[in-house]
Amino acid sequence: MRAVRFGVVGMGGMGLGHCRFLTEVVPETELTAVCDKHPDRAQSAGEQFGVPYFTDHEAMFRSGLLDAVLIATPHYGHAPVAISAFEHGLHVLVEKPLCVAASEGDQMIAAARRAGTKFAVGYQHRLRPEVQAARRLIEQGVIGEVRRTLLITAWYRTQAYYDSGGWRATWAGEGGGVLINQAPHYIDLWTWLGGLPSRVVGQTRTMLHEIETEDEAFALVEYPNGAHGYLYATTNEEPGENLIEICGDTGKLRLQDGVLQVWRLKHAIRQFTYEAEGMWDSIPAERIEPPMPPRPDSALEGQPALIQNFARAILDDEPLVAPGEEGLNTIEVINALILSSKRSQPVPIPVDRAAYDALLAELKAHSQPKTRIREQRVTDPNLIR
């Protein structure tokens, strides 16, 4: 079988997990090099997986060992490493989030287009059967024009998690908190299903953890057609929950912790409101079972499935499940919410690039090195999902 030769940049917990997938799980891939700016990490990973190791990603890109690169660095590394890879003619799969600032995303997309190579972002939840079914129903017009959306993405993280790396939950090292780290997967699904808002009024705050970025964020959003929505994200809640609702003129869709519920209305709300003659008339709603074909026993799931899709896009031009360009939508929402909170005003989308870059520069300038660090490099046990 033909295989895509991959190099991985960033040998933290995520990067090591990807190395295992490329080596042991995805048949269309071959791990041929690893890179980390810390020599001990690079050497350890190279020896563990039996491949050449580098401390300079440019040198790895020039080596001739790669067809594609998977980027698993801290967030600020995503854009410069991706742009360099594109300049060397390589295909790029970047872990979520796409980048920190929308201006960086613009540069990444432009570099990918110049290179003419494949570009994807690590939003593996798009591949879940219930998410795919929800997307198809929306595309088929089952729920009609969107009137309201809801996103709750609630997680729990210990202080030890935040203490595990000097970059975590700092403006200089990560560029945000819950919004840039835990929330992107579900912000991606929320915008993929409900559309990109056009206006955000948001608030961020640090309620529980000893960190300089937010562990809680919430926002009211508006859409170009006048629809509205609500977003809430936190790392302070247990048990965790991920809930998306998309309510339309002819139906409603709810995705909650892996379960999809769908209702179809007998009449469109807009039309029935003015045609009904009775003052207490209501619209019957039918609960429908979305068609979800069973996956083959051999089918991959989670991150391995996304990597496989990316490799097949390179080998056979299979359509990308999560094109890099679409990763910018999540960054638009995150930037707008943080800018709205820090400037205490509504923020339109597309977000003003210069305004957000100026804010980020301010926040980074006041960012303080951590005084308490107990470094850990442990792959998230939920990575495969």
Image (cartoon, helix red, strand yellow):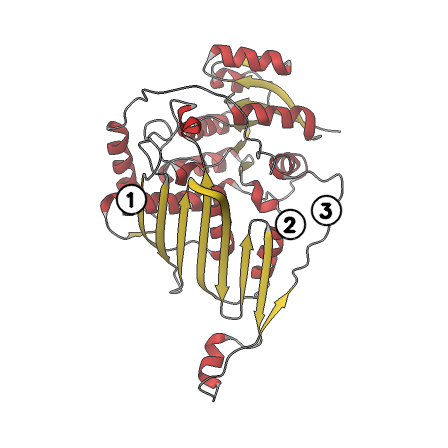
Label 1 residue SS: helix
Q: Residues within 10 Å of mark 1 (few under 14, many from 20)?
A: many
Amino acid, disc 1 = Leu
Image quarter hosting the N terminus: top right
Q: Residues within 10 Å of mark 3 (few under 14, many from 20)?
A: few
Circle nearer the N terminus (1, 2) = 2
Q: Secondary structure at mark 3?
A: loop
Q: Are marks 2 and 3 in contact (CB under 8 Å)?
A: yes
Q: Residue at x 38, y 25 (%)?
A: 167
Q: 82 or 260: which is nearer to us?
A: 260
Q: CA distance from mark 1 to mark 3?
A: 42 Å
Does 372 sit left or right of 312 as displayed? left
Q: Which residue is mark 1?
A: 339
Q: Earlier in the sequence, mark 1 or mark 3?
A: 3
The numbered mark at residue 266 is none
In front of the other: 198 or 119: 198
Q: How many marks?
A: 3
Considering the numbered disc 2 on the image, is that residue within a helix, a strand or a loop? helix
Residue 145 higher or lower than 380, as above or below: below
Give, as a three-letter code, the residue at label 2.
Pro
The C terminus sits in image quarter? top right
Mark 2 vs mark 3, CA separation in Å? 8 Å
Q: Looking at the picture, how far across and down is residue 361, in whole percent?
A: 26, 32
Residue for badge 2: 129
Q: Is residue 94 visible?
A: yes
Near-viewer residue (74 or 214): 214
Quadrant of residue 197 within the rendered picture: bottom left
Q: Position of residue 163 (x, y in %)?
A: 40, 24
> On the rendered structure, is 8 left or right of 27?
left
Provide the residue designation for mark 3. 295
Badge 2 or badge 3: first in the primary sequence? 2
For the question of whether residue 89 can be seen, the reply is no
